[in-house]
Amino acid sequence: MNNPPDISQDPSEHEEYAHNVQKHVRGYLMVGALLLSFTAITVALSYVNFGTPKANIAVAMLVATLKAGLVAAIFMHLAAEKRLIYRVLVFTGFFVLGLFWLIFLAWYDYPVVR
Amino acid sequence: MEIPYTISTRPDTGLWNAKVGIWLFLASEIMLFGGLFSAYIFLRLDARPGEWPHGLLNVPVGTMNTAILIMSSVTVVLAWAALKMRRYRAYWWYMLATILCGVIFLTVKLVYEWPQKFEHFGAYIKPEALEKYEPYLGNKHATERGLPPRLEISGHLHNHAALNDPNIKEYEVALDPVNADPTNPALDRPHFFYVPPTDKIAKIEKEDVERATMFLPTHSAYFASYFTITGLHGMHVLGGVLVFIYMWLPVSKRLYQRNPEHLANRVEVCGLFWHFVDLVWIFVFPLFYLL
Amino acid sequence: MIGIQYGLCGLVFLLFGFCLMMLMRWQLAYPGQALPVIGRWLPYFFGPNTMPDGKMTPEFYNSLGAMHGTIMIFMGVVPVAFAAFGNFVVPLQIGAPDMTFPKVNAASFWAFAVGGVVMLISFFVPGGAAQSGWTSYVPLAAISNRGPGLNPFFNGQTLWLVGFIFLITSSLLGAINFITTIIQLRAKGLTWMRLPFFVWAQFVTAFLLLLAFPPLESAIIMQLMDRVAATSFFLPSGLIVNGVKMDISGGGSPLLWQHLFWFLGHPEVYVLILPAFGIVGEILANNSRKPLWGYKSLVFSVLVIGFLSFVVWAHHMWLTGMGTTVSAFFQTTTLLISIPSVIILSAFFISLWGGSIRFNVPMLFATAFLPMFGIGGLTGIPLAFNSADLYLHDTYYVIAHFHYIVAPGTLFGLFAGIYYWFPKATGRRMNEFWGKVHFWPSLICMNVIFLPMFLQGMAGMHRRWYDGGQGWTLSGEHIWGLSGFQWNTPISWAAWIMGLAQIPFIINFFWSIKHGEKVNDNPWEATTLEWTAPSPPPHGNFVTTPVAYRGPYEYSLPGGERDFTMQNEPVEPTERTRRKTVEQPVLV
């Protein structure tokens, strides 16, 4: 889904431009509705036991990631953003996941005293 | 010399300056909340069985707050779209809606949710005294059902003086439902709707208590992380609301008349920040309220 | 302008941190003895509990240690190397009229100033300044500076935390500004691979600051909560202090603080060195009258350093009991990151080969940087190994290692930069003779101070002993026939002499602003764009917007009239033909 393009300087083209942006507006409203329903789904799913606590957490995080993805892609225009922004975010994501994962590794890797 | 590319895009990057700037700022914010989330993860992993509580937060209110924040995300992007379409009136209304949603979110949190916690009391029972308070903890029942043990008795504290006065030897607590009727299977899982403390009073000796406070940050690792993360998040919401108010006041109308694309860009940049704030909440909500 | 503000502020803080160190050296060389003259009025300045009768208390020594580290790094080197030089030189070198966000820049400076003031105020509150090391390890940091007579909020450690938040905010805002400016405001024709190496170094430094500082900020917020709101983010259950079980909720983890701290801490040390690499690169190319060797490898190396610096942090935590798997991971990444550093240093050395070298003061500092950084870097290698570090951790070996990199390393780079770009900022040159008077004693003293510290460390002398190891010496321990303690006296004297050697620099600096030898816009006959601007640069930096036609180090172009060609000189058609026919290696 592309971003609404920049408006032209020619006032006679404004009406057509406004019509184009209107199409994006419908998309925003749909995504908003989707997010609200996903919220309800998250709450409902939290009352279902998926077996282990890990599984419960995984399901909740999956739904949360989907919602976050929608916000990022559509509301924050990431789906049609420039390469530079992607690169910055990919590195950031890598480092924050590295922070979690490496601390996790260090947390549970210690010599066992015999 | 004027600084280039404040409104028009630079050809080889396709971006205008503030857009690069805000995404960089958001990258740093991801790392900031990442640090706090890592604290949540490791404090929770390190908690003894039964130490990390569930169901202490009001789920319907939290869900409503989540919905309010999502709606404010929708209204802010509609405000930006209205500006791009040069419809100032529509922009003004959508921006007002966004501000109101933000204010409602903060009000619910600061006037209802947090104070309700501050007025709630919880006492962690010493391991050797758990047997004695079995009628309130129901640990036999919990072990039978494969649930984690219950280590805490909570409810409304009747004798607040007991918190600071060393001469008062016991706490008088109007018990929460889960402590008033611990063996009831319906109370194994936290209730969706908030149920206030019952009328059943229990007297808990201070010497059996490992630690007893109101539900403040100092109470447990859970509340420490809850108040810190939602507090920092709330400060970001407040900051966003204040900036939006500035963009909604008549001073923005003047900028709109001078250079509407400039205002549209500013609204987009602040909108991006606002969406990020919404994003953080999308993760905070299940982690604290539901899991 | 902001660059100069940052520079002066940062230099003042640097001097203050240096004075703190000189105080510490007294205690180390003559432990328990009263400091003559100065010792009598210091208690009036720092408080009567700090130096009763002019003798330093252990608590005050610890404060000096913690604050020396904090002030030098976060209020001295980072503001000068990154903010000051960056704000002044980078827009000029990329041909930009200003930074992209001037108001954000101003906010960044004022956050820095407020943070600095808060840090300094912490000396004067009851209980004194923070005394838990610049690393502020918990649980000590969470419980120190507390007790009867001490304010629950206005105490040294809490103020340290608050001041730090301001300093971090300042760096974050600055980093955003730098990155956006370098991406968006490069002049026409200035492609990425035509950027001066200094700009690349600042670019990577800004990314390190942007992404590595926030987790520390979150950890600081949590430590603040621990101190002010009685939470237990970092306090474990069952914590006993002075024999008394603490009334805390427990459940926290001291290790979490260390992980979050060093997640910043390691990129931070690269923040300290990369701008100096950039400065030295510029000066070496200029004063050897030939291009930097291996420009592409230099760029690649800084990018790799930037990336890897995020995944090496646990080498500061070898003694926390990590297991072999995670230790192996971090050892590998730590050794890997030494490779690009060696590439950069080697490229610099090779750049000198065959050049016609001019030894002016900037060049003296820049060439001295090379072996000094070499020693610092090479001595880091044993520390990268879990097994060797078991013995060397928290000893003076570590102090010597990192000081070699920052003191005769980065600081020499910064001095070089000040002498080099002073003419651009003021239109006048600093005095060469006094510059040399500044240089030679500094170089010699730096080595007399830090070289013996390696021996002290290997002899086992611990890093934070306030008596300089005297107690351990008096117990009769002699290792290697040389007691580590006895080195303290020559080290301290060298430190004080080095302090004296900075006086000509300070006088030279301020005197030359008004009375230095007037020079034209390009006194060093350099090639990069900042030398096309007027000295000092006006508002908007340039009279006409520069356009770049060539690379940054076009020195000694074959067939050229002068031994340098500026970046904004168009490439003539005749020149192009000449380059095609003459059998010369293509520069850059």
Image (cartoon, coloured by chain):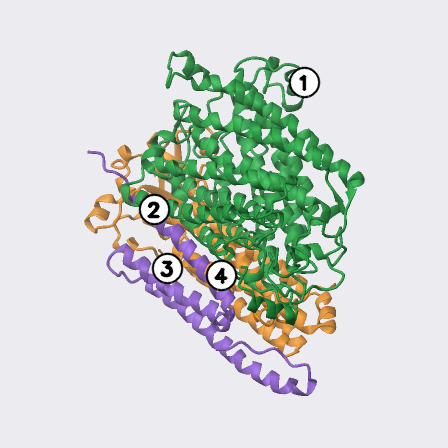
Chain colours: A purple, B orange, C green
> Which residue is painted at 58% across and 35% down in the image?
C71
C-alpha separation, residue under disc 2 versus residue under disc 1 = 51 Å
Q: Which mark is residue B192?
A: 3
Q: What chain is tagged by disc 3?
A: B
Q: Residue at x 56, y 78 (%)?
A: A4
Relative to C510, is A45 above or below? below
Q: Chain of mark 4?
A: A
Which is in the foreground here, disc 3 or disc 2? 2
Can you tell which of label 4 and label 1 is closer to the viewer?
4
Find disc 1 in the rendering and name its residue: C41
Q: Secondary structure at mark 3?
A: loop
Kindly indicate whether the residues beneath marks 2 and 1 are on one polypeptide chain.
yes
Tell me if mark 4 has few (under 14), some (14-19) or many (20+) residues whose alpha carbon lies within 10 angstroms of its own.
some
**Quadrant of residue C385 in the image?**
top left
How far apart marks 3 and 1 lie (CA) works out to: 67 Å
Marks 4/1: CA–CA distance? 53 Å
Q: Which residue in the structure is indicated by mark 2?
A: C332
In front of the other: C582 or C164: C582
Mark toward the viewer: 4 or 3: 4
Mark 4 vs mark 3: tell me if same chain. no
Compared with residue C404, is residue C586 higher up or lower down, i.e. above or below? Answer: below
Look at the numbered discs 2 and 1 and tell me whether their residues touch, using CB distance below 8 Å: no
Q: Residues within 10 Å of mark 2 (few under 14, many from 20)?
A: some
Three-letter amino acid code at disc 3? Phe
Circle 3 crowding by C-alpha within 10 Å: few under 14, some 14–19, many from 20: some
Amino acid type at circle 4 is Val
- The residue at the far front in this view is C582
Q: Are marks 4 and 2 on the same chain?
A: no
- The dot on residue A88 is 4
